[in-house]
């Protein structure tokens, strides 16, 4: 089962800010005035990084197991679902048009399902994943 929960290291810099970095996603980094703010900003940063991968048709890196000095960061449910759909479509070598055909929807709807900025209902993403033989699983921690 693939998850989109990534380990982040949060370290205080010489100016007193807390820098959050993701070793699995080197281009994703943020900071905060406090540790708690850095954690919140890290979640937003992760969402933006995953959305960027989807929008730019780039591979979404696999998440590593956390090391002792790292914190697990989760994206929003919608971005995690879109990332799951994107990785499934990519792994199966499908285009957005083909996805739309499989689902029996217009090409516009197919594109929106994979658009990280479009507010797709989770049930629609779940239906798309089911149509490709996958199941969305939601967890609480």
Image: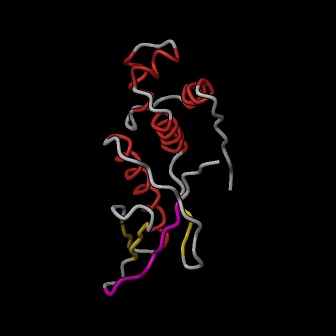
In the rendered image, residue 117, in percent from the top left (x then y), is placed at: 37, 36
In the rendered image, residue 110, in percent from the top left (x then y), is placed at: 43, 22
Which quarter of the figure has residue 135?
A: top right
Which quarter of the figure has residue 12?
A: bottom left
Q: In this rendering, would 67 be left or right of 30?
A: right
Q: Is residue 7 magenta?
A: yes
Residue stretch in magenta: 6-14
Which of 122/88 is in front?
Answer: 88
Residue at x 52%, y 66% (from the top left corner): 7
Residue at x 66%, y 43% (from the top left corner): 138
In the rendered image, residue 49, in percent from the top left (x then y), is placed at: 38, 53
Quadrant where the image shows the C terminus: bottom right
In the rendered image, residue 133, in percent from the top left (x then y), is placed at: 63, 29
Residue at x 50%, y 33% (from the top left corner): 92
Q: In this rendering, would 25 be left or right of 65?
A: left
Which of 110/72 is in front?
Answer: 110
Scheme of image coloration: secondary structure
Q: Does residue 79 sit above or below 103 in this rendering? A: below
């Amino acid at each position: 089962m693939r998850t989109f929960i990534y380990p982040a290291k949060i370290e205080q810099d010489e100016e007193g800010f807390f820098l959050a970095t993701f070793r699995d996603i080197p281009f994703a980094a943020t900071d905060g005035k406090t540790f708690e703010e850095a954690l919140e900003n890290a979640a937003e940063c992760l969402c933006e990084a995953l959305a960027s991968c989807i929008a730019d048709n780039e591979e979404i890196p696999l998440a590593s197991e956390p090391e002792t000095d790292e914190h697990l960061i989760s994206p929003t449910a919608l971005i995690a679902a879109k990332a799951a759909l994107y990785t499934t479509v990519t792994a199966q070598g499908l285009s957005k048009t083909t996805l739309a055909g499989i689902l029996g929807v217009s090409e516009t709807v197919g594109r929106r399902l994979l658009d990280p900025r479009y507010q797709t209902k989770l049930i629609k993403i779940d239906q798309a994943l089911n149509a490709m033989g996958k199941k969305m699983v939601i967890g609480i921690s």
